[in-house]
Amino acid sequence: MSTVSVEIELDLPDGVTIRGYERHEGSHVFEVDFDLPERCLCTKCGHEVESNLRYRNDVLAIRDLDLQGQPSFWVYQPPLHQCPKCRQRTQIPAPFKRPRVTYTHRFEQFVLESLVGSSVEDVARRLSVSAEMVEDILAHQLAAEHEIPATAQISSLGMDELSLKKRHKLYVTVMSDLTDPEHPRVLAVATGRDRAAAEACLSKLTPEQRSGVRSHRTDMSAVYPHICAEWLPNSQTVIDRFHVAKKLGEIVDRVRKKHANLS
């Protein structure tokens, strides 16, 4: 059997280097390392010295963006700094992910983009991750309080509600920038699915940005279209196709169950 070499182009964050690659059960696995600091501060005694590197005995697997329609993972041996004064060992954080999570920054952003016009369950199923992971990413976005750059030009907005099931039906309102349909961006997340939540999101835009919006896509509730009409004076409502299909599906289910009960 003949073998071939395949070249894969990857967009890597600054300071990250690929050291190895293998295929594992339908996934792409890349061995990576990253630039380490020359000096470290001990989290216990506060002593700062040149890095005194050690490595943990285990290997971490971090989910990254899909590659050729299949999951990809970055694996690395976590580096540690051992303080020469108190002997405390401190793990050096990886620059491509948040502490205590198993996915990269850019995978996190991709999950948020995928939630626009979709649901937690659909995104989890499509990316082969747990619904809990998707909810945790959304919850972090809710707590982060990101500012929207005043220079951002937004011509199309999305307003959706999402249910976080593991949190006892906690609903959140998600406002997204749909100016580039291929790359939607989550702009704001607020707890609830009422007027207060929608206004909390819209208030993050400047008056000039709100005037520049030409269309807004919402679900079929009475809340979001009405509030967007008040806050976005030059915008027209567009009902999201995802929610139209969902509503039609609910009607079909009710009719089917009614006929089943009559038969």
Image: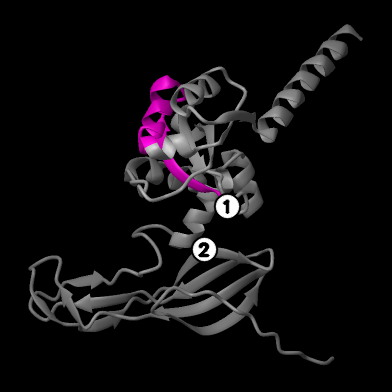
Range of magenta residues: 183-207
Q: Residue at x 18, y 76 (%)?
A: 40
Query: With 10 as the anchor, is 174 left or right in this view?
Result: left
Judging by the rendered image, the residue that carries numbered circle 2 is: 63
Query: With 27 as the anchor, is 55 left or right in this view?
Result: left
Query: With 80 as the anchor, is 105 left or right in this view?
Result: right
| Amino acid at circle 1 | Val
Q: Secondary structure at mark 1?
A: loop
What colouring style does the render use? one colour
Tell me the number on the disc at residue 33: none
Query: With 261 as the anchor, is 163 left or right in this view?
Result: left
Q: Which sits in the foreground, 169 or 201?
A: 201
Can residue 103 be seen from the camera position used here? no
List the single residue furthest toward the bottom. 2
Q: Position of residue 47 (x, y in %)?
A: 8, 74
Q: Residue at x 50, y 79 (%)?
A: 31
Q: Is residue 231 magenta?
A: no
| Amino acid at circle 2 | Arg
Judging by the rendered image, the residue that carries numbered circle 1 is: 129
Q: Secondary structure at mark 2?
A: strand
